[in-house]
Amino acid sequence: MTVLDPNRYTRPAEAAILRSDIAADDAARTALRQRAAQALTALRDAMTALRAAQEAVDSAQKIYDHIAQLEASLEERTRVSRGLLHPIRRLPAEILSMIFVADERSESDQPFIVAAVCRRWRAVALCTPSLWVTVSCELPTVEATERSVTYMNFHLDRSAQLPLKVLIDYEVKGSVPGTSFALVLAKLFRRARDFTFTSSSDTADMLSQCLTGRAPDLTDLYLNDTCFPGVSDTTLRLDFEAPRLRLVRCTGSQILWRGSVAYPSVRTLRLCTEHSDTQVVMDVVRRFPKVVHLEISCFGALHSPDPLNLRAERLTRLDLKMTGGMDANVARSFSFPSLRAAKIEIEEGDTIPTDAMTSFFQAALVTVRELELHYGLGSGIAAGLQACFLLERLDLHIPHYDNDAVGILGILAAPAVNGGWSCPRLHTLELSGRVKRPITDILVTLASARRPGAAAGPPVALIKIKIPLTTRLRSSQEVDHAALQRRLDSLLA
């Protein structure tokens, strides 16, 4: 349609065109109104159908929810009914209590898990003292330590004076917990059968206050506080009575036993503590007269101006690590008439005079059957081994500098001037470390001289020499261990 200027008068020709356009627009408008009416009718019909569909959806949802509710109700009623018919409900409380105690899948949390099942189980759990005898706590902060007091007291109350198994992992840094924790820890110690306390903090003062008094049921004691930085020269002062104590393991702080109390019931003693010296060894012999297995690391010097009395009548196993040296007076003071097995470690660079080392073997190791030697400087060991007449098995850990190993093996490879053999009952020799060429020849000589059937060999033949296997040689001084092992085996076959 032509755009007309509304500010001028139309001419006859233009008027005819306008009347034609008006007639066409009127006709189009009538058609559009008819279409709009049809669309409106369709929209109303669709909205009516939509409302009907939504009502159908809502109705179906209500029916589904109702069915699901009925199903859940049936499931719950079936579960309760089956629970009421379960044979465990016919068990008396005494049998339930025995089942709870026998189930060791969980230790410290087990009584709380059992008590949360139902009211009957809770009542049985609260009336079963043996279910509450394990007290296990991990204490990373002061707040956790303070909260644990309630937990510990609950075990103390519910266990009804039964001996406890106590395991405390104390990792608190810096701050010290209140007196309530120290008080409950002391109560746990006096009630404990097994008492384990590990820490990476300095707890010597706190333990010195708590580990006191009488612990009539204590059999196992384990204290470990090795890994705290920035603290040195800590001393744990112990003063308690434990007539049933059998095992003591202490690692970390120096132990100072106060008073005159002794522990004749202890059979196993393991000490790896700071500043272990002659006084500590004397204290061990005096306070633990019937120890059977002694493991001790002496970081201090074993020196004395006069001979001592270091006799342990019943000692059968000795693990001794020396890092501070030993003089002849102390070396001659040891006496272990029942000793059968020993492990001796001498740190590389430790200065022990030859006469002291020889005296130590002659005094302490004369009865051993099994001997394991770790040494850095072995001066005196070769001569000392001549006193080990009963030795049957020798494990020799060869250090980086192996000149002493040649001397040690040399006294085993040939008889003495008087015709007697060192270690005449030796039947097994095991070496660890790198076997270098200077040792190869002496091993072959040793195997040949003491092999089964050797004409002038010792009364007991050597039946096994074992050396470590290696995959590659590191230097020209080293030998093929596998080939050497085959050669030794063929000599001893």
Image (tube, rainbow, N blue to C red):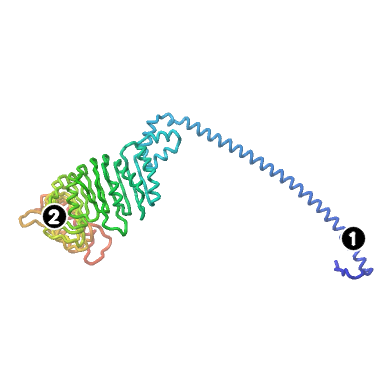
Q: What residue type is labelled 1?
A: Ala
Considering depth in this image, is 277 or 257 the residue closer to the camera?
257
Left/right placement of residue 286 relative to residue 126 reads left
Q: Which of 391 and 287 is in front in this view?
A: 287
The residue positioned 19% from the left and 43% from the top of the image is: 264
Residue 344: horizontal and vertical position, in percent?
A: 19, 54
Q: What crowding class fits label 1: few (fewer than 14 Cα within 10 Å), some (14-19), or many (20 or more)?
A: few
- Element type where label 1 sits in the image: helix
Q: In which quarter of the image is residue 252?
A: bottom left
The residue singled out by tag 1 in the image is 23
User: CB atoms at circles 1 and 2 under 8 Å apart?
Assistant: no
Q: Which residue in the rendered view is the most extreme toward the front? A: 179
Q: Is residue 209 above or below residue 101?
A: below
Under mark 2, the amino acid is Val
Task: Please say whether residue 298 is visible from this viewpoint.
Answer: yes
Q: Is residue 117 above or below residue 222?
A: above
For label 2, the residue is 330
Q: Which residue is drawn at 24% across and 51% down?
A: 255
